[in-house]
Image: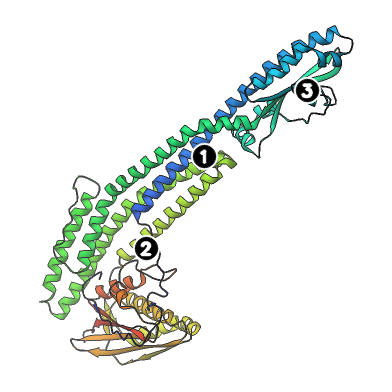
Amino acid sequence: MPGAGCLVRSTQHTALSTAAPSTAALGTQHHLVRLGIKGKQVLGVTSIVGAVVVVLSVLHLARLASVSLEESRARAELLANAVYQRARDVVSAGSDPYLALRQDPGLRSILESSAYSKHVTFAAIVDPRGVAVAHADASREGLAIPAGDDIAALLTRSEMAQLAAIYRGPGRTLELRQPLLLGDTDFGSIRVGISTLLIRADLNTSLRPSLWTALASLAVAVIGAMLLAQLLLRPIHVITSGLTRLGRGEFGVRLDLDPHDEFGEIGTFFNAVSDQLSADRGANSALDPAAQEQAAVRYARKLAALGRLSAGVAHEVKNPLNAMTIHLELLRQQLAAAGDTAAPALQHVDVIGNEIRRLDEVVQSFLKFARPEDLKLERVPLAPLLDEVLRVVKPDAERHGVTVTIEGGSAPDVNGDPTMLRQAFLNLALNACQAMPNGGTLRIQCDARRDRRVAIAFADTGVGIRPEHLQRIFDLYFTTKEKGSGIGLSMVYRTIQMHDGEIEVESTPGVGTTFTVLLPQAQA
């Protein structure tokens, strides 16, 4: 339980119900695996390192692709120059230039040597129509040679475009072209083919060391993130434990935090607040009713101070979140500039961004719970207050087929903050309606109790609460609703506690649930 002053009872009738494990505050049960801050930090750091490694690997591979293409062009150009020199001598010495080129053994030897040049698949001399006059493969002479993409044009594009051209599709042939002129006449051209498949195979071989480096980097990132998370989150765990113990009503709770780091001042302030709360609560039992009211106000102020302490904790968490968000946006811009090849990495960045935003929402909801409003106690008539609640609840009740009745309008007034009590009663009524998806009855009854207390009971005929859930329904963030926040009943519990009241729960699965709020009666 999150604090002192709450009584939880379970009325169990196992033979009466086979209903689903929903509650007036919970709804249909769903077992969801939620990552804690440590898991999210490890996942975030690992994802960022992984994305950076992928981007750097792609950039490195693009650079290697550009170098490979340039080297292949240089080898093809050297081969084309040798063919050109030999062709010029052969053409000038013969009457039929095409026949001379085809029959020259020296030119044939040069063309066939292309098979030994890295990445080169063929070398040929073609006429203006694209028909092979002389070819490294003699069987293709006299056949039209399909034109491939010009490697010189590809080399003018960006490195990422060159990498995409190499890895696009099943592979293709690039060509280096050198024109041949006989006087002023277009005699044909020298064409040297370069295979992107061969270049791709060399790049894949050179990429293996980078893959091992990437895996090692990810492993180091995971280990480093886990150690860092353990170091950074330990003070938060200590503070959370202290808040839980203080909420259970323990006196003299102390935090063991290093006074020399950022959390040291928070620990010192927490210890001072804890000591003062213990002193105030210990003295309340001997006070008269008027003094008890003043003590309740002071206690509420102490809770507000504790809320500011919690806000400081949340601030320490939000600072790294803001820094991660800024650097994530910078990384997103760099990846967007890299083009289509960075699209997979951008997807990881989007996932990380969504998780950071969700974690920020959790911190905001924690602040909403931990930073209570100033308590303004006054005489509160219950009848008009519950009428206001009924007007708000009525549309939701009609939608679920729920009939709402209010009994005991003549009950004594209570001492409390009307705004905070209205919100607490509204939460209990709405939860009761949601626990009756097939219709039912919600009965709100007020009556005076002994010890100058007033009981306000919210009894529904819903599906009830499973016994194993009763001890957790007031825990912050505990919910079985698919879209529940888990702070509704925690806010109700905190409000009743601030009013020096109690809340009791009786539930029978399949029969219904009754929440009974006990508040101090207003002074005459």
- Report the residue marked by disc 1: 334
Say few, some or many: other residues with alpha carbon within 10 Å of mark 3 (under 14 / 14 to 19 / 20 or more).
some
Q: Residue at x 55, y 42 (%)?
A: 342
Picture quadrant of residue 425 = bottom left
Q: Which residue is mark 2?
A: 365
Whole-percent x, y for residue 380 in the image: 30, 82
* Secondary structure beneath label 3: helix
Residue sitting farthest toward the front: 139
Disc 1, SS: helix
Q: Residue at x 64, y 35 (%)?
A: 165
Find disc 3 in the rendering and name its residue: 138
Q: Amino acid at mark 1?
A: Gln
Mark 3 and mark 2: Cα distance apart in space: 79 Å
Alpha carbon separation for disc pair 2 and 1: 33 Å
Say above or below: 432 vs 85: below
Crowd around label 2: few <14 · some 14–19 · many ≥20 (10 Å)? some
Look at the image and tell me whether residue 182 can be seen: yes
Q: Amino acid at mark 2?
A: Ser
Tell me the quarter of the picture where residue 221 sits.
top left
Residue 293 horizontal/vertical position (percent): 19, 76
